[in-house]
């Protein structure tokens, strides 16, 4: 993210830095409503930050989808058997 900021020639760099540093909290709805509103307004006004937000949002969604994949039943059975063997 900091590299993206170095290339960013927007007049309000402090606001950009704040928005980009808190984008994960924003995506996870971990911010106070007022902070979310501030970041949302900045993203609406700043094309560069919106692009970075969209990239982070896409990555987060890909991770979320990847973690939904379940292990095959045969693997789960093998793990349980090994666990029983190890415990004796």
Image (cartoon, helix red, strand yellow):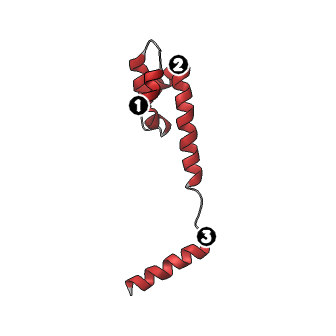
Q: Residues within 10 Å of mark 3 (few under 14, many from 20)?
A: few
Q: Is residue 33 visible?
A: no
**Upstream in the sequence, badge 2 or badge 3?**
2
Image-quadrant location for residue 74: bottom right
Q: Residue at point 41% right, 18% down?
A: 13
Q: Residue at point 47% right, 38% down?
A: 29
**Upstream in the sequence, badge 2 or badge 1?**
1
Q: Residue at point 40% right, 83% down?
A: 86
Residue 77: x percent and y percent?
Answer: 55, 78
Q: Is residue 23 positioned above or below 74 on the image?
A: above
Q: Is residue 64 left or right of residue 3?
A: right
The C terminus: image quadrant: bottom left
Residue 38: x percent and y percent?
Answer: 45, 22
Secondary element type, mark 2 = loop
Image-quadrant location for residue 1: top left
Circle 3 sits on which residue?
72
Secondary element type, mark 1 = helix
Circle 2 sits on which residue?
46
Residue 2: x percent and y percent?
Answer: 41, 29
Residue 59: x percent and y percent?
Answer: 55, 42
């Amino acid at each position: 993210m900091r590299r993206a900021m170095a290339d960013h020639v927007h007049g309000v760099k402090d606001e950009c830095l704040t928005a980009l540093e808190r984008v994960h909290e924003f995506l996870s709805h971990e911010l106070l409503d007022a902070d979310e509103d501030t970041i949302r307004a900045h993203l609406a006004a700043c094309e560069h930050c919106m692009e970075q937000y969209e990239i982070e949002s896409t990555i987060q969604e890909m991770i979320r989808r990847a973690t939904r994949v379940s292990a095959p039943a045969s693997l789960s059975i093998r793990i349980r058997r090994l666990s029983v063997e190890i415990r004796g």
